[in-house]
Image: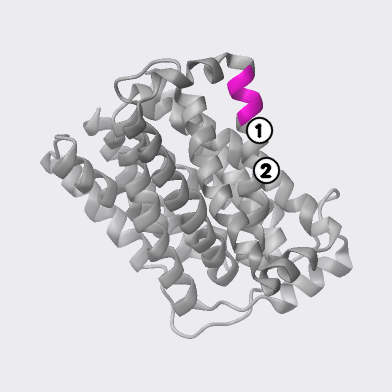
């Protein structure tokens, strides 16, 4: 039960990250967004590890565990987050979240093959629903998002909102390909984390620190390229603040995710996290309506995907 609660809290936090990052991505690149949010995660996880005392349990993690966590960090926070943000920039956070529900059957298949977890017929039906959901959202052609009223106070100014909405084009090929690339990274990393933490206690948050540090190290190495440095320095302060907010929420999401994976199977945690697509839909409609294309096909696709994820969570536990 604890794993279920932690996974749901994580999914809500991921949704808040998505809508804040989506606003930032209207003004900056996916690469810049991933850079800011990953680097922010290192001090946040260090503080959490220090406060919980898990930092002092570092000696309890074997070399194999460090290698698995580092690989998970580079794969998830480096590769996965970049393509996640690129997908959100191209097709909107709402559509991207639903397509990424395909992470669930992918992760369960990997868990079945390598961790000995089982798949029942009803879980197979859930997987079918998850596959159908994103498929019905694809539409012919691509058009700009409909203009919407400016976001509530605390968001961008009305002038910025109009500029963001005017700039947004639904780029389906780029968006869906990026979302599918995200699936491989997001679907594999839970297996690595579970393999590293399943036999350990009191190191889940510290495991997040190790993973984030590995990803941050790789990103810092990319700064040797002058164009990369220029990309980061060109961001406006308001955009940096949006990514810092997104980074804080994704830190909370990842912290609860690592805690959930330390006490519950991948086949339970991963499906429950995909229910965040509903929260992303709600938050996107409320805050980012001018940056999303939300219609009945999108809503139906999300509901089907979430229904499939719930079936996997219920019958996979």
* Label 1 crowd (10 A; few <14 / some 14-19 / many >=20): some
Q: Tell whether label 1 touches label 2 (CB within 8 Å).
A: yes
Q: Quadrant of residue 189?
A: top left
Q: Which residue occupies the foreground of this view, 68 or 10?
A: 68
Q: Mark on residue 40?
A: 2
Q: Residue at x 45, y 68 (%)?
A: 178
Q: Residue at x 62, y 79 (%)?
A: 169
Is the residue 277 above or below the residue 3 in the image? Answer: below
* Magenta stretch holds residue 48: yes
Q: Is residue 270 visible?
A: no
Figure quadrant of the N terminus: top left
Q: Does residue 61 appear to the left or right of 294 in the view shown?
A: left
Does dot 2 land on a helix, a strand or a loop? helix
Magenta segment: 46-50
* Magenta stretch holds residue 310: no
Q: Does residue 233 appear to the left or right of 276 in the view shown?
A: right
């Amino acid at each position: 039960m604890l794993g279920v609660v932690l996974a749901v809290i994580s999914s809500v936090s991921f949704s808040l990250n998505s809508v804040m990052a989506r606003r930032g991505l209207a003004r900056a690149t996916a690469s810049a967004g991933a850079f800011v949010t990953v680097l922010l995660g290192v001090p946040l996880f260090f503080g959490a590890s220090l406060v919980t005392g898990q930092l002092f349990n570092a000696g309890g993690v074997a070399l194999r565990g460090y290698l698995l966590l580092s690989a998970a960090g580079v794969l998830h926070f480096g590769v996965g987050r970049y393509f996640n943000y690129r997908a959100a920039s191209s097709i909107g956070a709402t559509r991207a979240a639903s397509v990424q529900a395909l992470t669930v059957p992918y992760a369960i298949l990997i868990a079945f093959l390598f961790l000995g977890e089982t798949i029942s017929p009803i879980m197979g039906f859930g997987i079918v629903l998850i596959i159908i959901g994103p498929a019905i959202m694809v539409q012919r052609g691509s058009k700009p998002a409909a203009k919407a009223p400016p976001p509530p106070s605390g968001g961008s100014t009305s002038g910025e909102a109009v500029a963001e909405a005017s700039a947004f084009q639904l780029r389906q090929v780029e968006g869906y390909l990026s979302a599918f690339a995200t699936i491989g990274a997001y679907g594999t990393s839970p297996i690595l984390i579970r393999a590293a933490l399943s036999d350990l206690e009191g190191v889940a948050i510290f495991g997040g620190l190790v993973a984030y540090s590995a990803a941050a190290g790789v990103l810092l190495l990319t700064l040797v390229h002058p164009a990369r440095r220029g990309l980061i320095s060109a961001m406006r302060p308001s955009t940096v603040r949006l990514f810092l907010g997104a980074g804080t929420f994704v830190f909370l999401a990842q912290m609860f995710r690592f805690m959930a994976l330390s006490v519950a199977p991948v086949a339970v945690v991963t499906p429950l996290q995909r229910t965040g697509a509903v929260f992303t839909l709600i938050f996107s409609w409320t805050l980012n309506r001018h940056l999303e294309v939300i219609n009945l096909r999108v809503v139906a696709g999300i509901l089907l995907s979430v229904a499939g994820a719930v079936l996997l969570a219920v019958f996979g536990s």
